[in-house]
Image (tube, grey):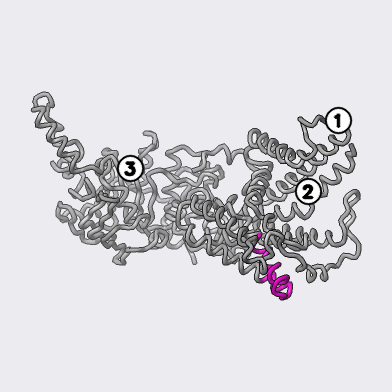
């Protein structure tokens, strides 16, 4: 097989606010701004996905569609079930009920590695660089359909040498684009937190995914590197990939997301473009509580206590998660 | 004290049959633990099942030598699947617990009174190695200057070293390939490897099988070199010695188990010789070292050497210090 033909051109530098963003925004312009809104061209659809941990419903998503070629942000307060939902979508956890599909094919009961092979690749909140492998070996590992990964062919190097060279060439190109080429032969464990995030994203590209799922790509990254990481996320879309990411950093969400999905207490409570979602009362409530703009000293203490008690009784899950 | 004899014995022990048996077990463990990160605490079971597979077929059922070898190999494959299929989907500790228990179940089955007619109880089995020694091409023993082996010993040790070399070459070839890269990735973080589209479970099962089969070679050498098998040879300390050897030489290094086994057995014999020599040459007081204590004290000395190594060279003799310095995981 020839990998060069279908691999994204890593040398081309995408423009800021590219045609791809315009295209994604245009496609989303007519979409209803309500939870579970259907999209004109959905790459990922989920329906009735529910996951319980004992008596606690961590995820209960009625409907979600993700528009192809867009950057969609999944936000929500701590314990909203974002990462659990992520794990369910990527096969790292199995839901109690519900179905979800990628490019129209159901992913129900499919193992995580098969989902990755279909072209939906994820990264992790706690970065998983493979410490005692070098950076280039991390990258090579990402390539799929390697002849030498079969145990019998592995001992016959002439069967995989050629492919190995091809993969290495591709890996070097992506490393150069992510400015990790100087670290090529260092152990991944010697990289800084931000560099590990970059490596994880670069390694995911080696799989040649159609859709990239990023779990908190900005967590633990120093501010200097954030800007470049933002650029890389946008560049994924500008190469035709679809991005779904979980993030706490609201500046980042405002900057890169074409569409925002808000989760709270396991459910999707709002959807829409960044500006309109962040002005939504339900979202502000979920994040800051109903009284965020009221001075507490002017309120009835007894009434507050009652509210607090009611809150604790209905949502015991908050401290459980994450 | 006869230093010449003590050193000769130590040198002999560092290439002799015991060294070969433990070395092969440790090469298998290196595939499990060193490369794939699998915590197999029951390598003794693989060795025992192979040895008894051969011994039982020949001594109890009167079948041929080669049929015995085949039954031993099949039994090891069945054991690996039996241990791996239910546990390798779970967290790493499950394999550790199950293999540790399985090794004891295997040993207690072989030494049970009920199955005495088949496995020979605590006495084990003898008289199954004739087929092997009929193939012996040595008419005189190997003579390496001070070290000499009888023609019978020479045959067992030669086959043992051929197996060591073959399995080391196999490990080397596998671990430089993309297959070995996936395995090392799994050792570092199996979820990350899964997220890249690799069937982690299948790779772990393959590693368990390959390491178990290399351990089985140690079982055959054990059965044939001694021309006898006893169940208590493969008590849990067998596995722990194999781990000691692996860590001593350097895990995830092709030559680590060979160097580790040579040092382990050489040092054991050396300290034994020195202690016994000192006892006969000088008037060592009974409270310091009783006449029967040398056998136990030599293990203390090896343990002390291992502790010093872990303090000053935690990566083992052949390991790479940089790798240890990284916060793995």
Q: Which mark is residue B283?
A: 1
Q: Quadrant of the N terminus of chain B?
A: top right
Q: What residue lies at 75% left-to-right and 68% top-to-bottom? A: B128
Foreground disc of the pair 3, 2: 2
Magenta highlight range: B48-70
Q: Nearer the viewer, residue A238 or A99?
A: A99
For the image, the number of numbered tags is: 3
Q: Residue at x 16, y 55 (%)?
A: A31
**Distance from Cα at disc 3 to Cα at disc 2:** 53 Å
Asked if residue A315 lies left or right of residue A320, the reply is left
Q: Which mark is residue B218?
A: none
Q: Mark 1 and mark 2 in contact (Cβ < 8 Å)?
A: no
Dot 1: element: loop
Give the residue furthest to the top: A297
Please state the chain letter of the residue tagged with numbered disc 2 in the rendered image: B
* Residue A179 against residue B95 in the figure, above or below: above
Q: Position of residue A270 (x, y in %)?
A: 18, 48
User: For the view shown, which residue lies furthest in the front direction?
Assistant: B113
Residue B153 is inside the magenta segment: no
Quarter-of-image position of residue A297: top left
Residue B264: percent from the left, percent from the top? Answer: 73, 45
Q: Earlier in the sequence, mark 2 or mark 1?
A: 2
**Residue corresponding to mark 3:** A322
- Judged by depth in the image, the label closer to the viewer, 1 or 3, is 1
State left or right for residue A138 relative to residue B300: left
Q: Chain of mark 3?
A: A
Subunit under mark 1: B
User: Which residue is rendered at x = 49% and y = 62% of the image?
Assistant: B85
State the mark number for residue B14: 2
Q: State the image coordinates of residue B248 (x, y, percent, origin top left).
A: 67, 43
State the image quarter where residue A239 is shown.
bottom left
């Amino acid at each position: 097989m020839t990998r060069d033909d279908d691999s994204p051109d890593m040398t081309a530098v995408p423009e800021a606010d590219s045609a791809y963003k315009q295209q994604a925004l245009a496609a989303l312009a007519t979409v209803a701004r309500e939870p579970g809104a259907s999209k004109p061209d959905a790459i990922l659809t989920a329906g009735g996905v529910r996951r319980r941990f004992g008596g606690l419903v961590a995820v209960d998503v009625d409907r979600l569609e993700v528009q192809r070629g867009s950057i969609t942000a999944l936000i929500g307060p701590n314990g909203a079930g974002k990462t659990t939902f992520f794990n369910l979508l990527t096969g790292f956890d199995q839901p109690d009920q519900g179905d979800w599909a990628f490019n129209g094919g159901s992913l129900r009961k499919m193992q995580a590695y098969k989902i990755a092979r279909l072209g939906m690749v994820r990264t992790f909140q706690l970065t998983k660089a493979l410490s005692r492998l070098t950076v280039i070996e991390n990258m090579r590992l990402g390539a799929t359909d390697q002849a030498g990964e079969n145990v019998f062919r592995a001992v016959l190097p002439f069967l995989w040498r050629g492919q190995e060279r091809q993969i290495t060439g591709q890996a070097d190109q992506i490393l150069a684009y992510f400015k990790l080429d100087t670290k090529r032969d260092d152990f991944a464990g010697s990289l800084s937190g931000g560099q590990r995030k970059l490596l994880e994203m670069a390694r995911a590209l080696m799989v040649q995914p159609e859709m990239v799922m990023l779990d908190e790509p900005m967590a633990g990254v120093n501010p200097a590197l954030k800007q470049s990481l933002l650029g890389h996320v946008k560049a994924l879309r500008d190469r035709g990939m679809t991005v779904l990411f979980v993030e706490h950093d609201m500046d980042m969400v405002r900057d890169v997301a074409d569409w925002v999905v808000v989760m709270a207490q396991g459910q999707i409570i709002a959807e829409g473009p960044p500006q309109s979602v962040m002005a939504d009362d339900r979202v502000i409530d979920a994040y800051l509580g109903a009284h965020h703009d009221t001075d507490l000293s002017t309120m009835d203490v007894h009434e507050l206590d009652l509210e607090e008690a009611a809150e604790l009784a209905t949502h015991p899950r908050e401290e459980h998660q994450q | 004290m006869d230093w010449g004899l003590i050193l000769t014995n130590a040198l002999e022990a560092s290439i002799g049959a015991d060294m070969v048996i433990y070395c092969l077990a440790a090469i298998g463990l290196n595939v499990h633990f060193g490369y794939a990160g699998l915590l197999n605490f029951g390598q003794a079971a693989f060795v025992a099942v192979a040895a008894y597979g051969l011994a039982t077929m020949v001594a109890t059922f009167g079948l041929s030598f080669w049929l015995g070898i085949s039954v031993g190999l099949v039994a090891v494959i069945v054991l690996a699947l039996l241990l791996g299929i239910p546990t390798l989907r779970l967290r790493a500790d499950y394999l550790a617990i199950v293999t540790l228990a399985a090794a004891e179940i295997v040993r207690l089955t072989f030494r049970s009174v009920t199955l005495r007619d088949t496995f020979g109880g605590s006495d084990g089995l003898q008289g199954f190695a004739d087929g092997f020694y009929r193939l012996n091409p040595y008419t005189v023993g190997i003579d390496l200057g001070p070290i000499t082996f009888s023609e019978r010993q020479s045959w067992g040790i030669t086959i043992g070293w051929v197996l060591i070399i073959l399995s080391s070459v196999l490990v080397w070839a596998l671990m430089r390939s993309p297959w070995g890269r996936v395995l090392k990735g799994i050792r570092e973080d199996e979820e990350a490897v899964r997220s890249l589209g690799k069937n982690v479970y299948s790779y772990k099962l393959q590693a368990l099988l390959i390491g178990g089969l290399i351990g089985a070679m140690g079982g055959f050498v054990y059965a044939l070199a001694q021309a006898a098998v006893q169940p208590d040879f493969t008590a849990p300390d067998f596995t722990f010695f194999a781990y000691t050897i692996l860590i001593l030489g350097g895990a995830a290094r092709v030559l680590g188990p060979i160097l580790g086994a040579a040092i382990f057995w050489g040092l054991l014999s050396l300290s034994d010789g020195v202690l016994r020599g000192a006892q006969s040459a000088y008037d060592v007081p009974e409270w310091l070292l009783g006449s029967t204590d040398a056998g136990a004290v030599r293990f203390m000395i090896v343990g002390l050497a291992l502790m010093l190594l872990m303090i000053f060279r935690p990566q083992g003799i052949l390991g790479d210090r940089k790798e240890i310095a990284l916060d793995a995981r």
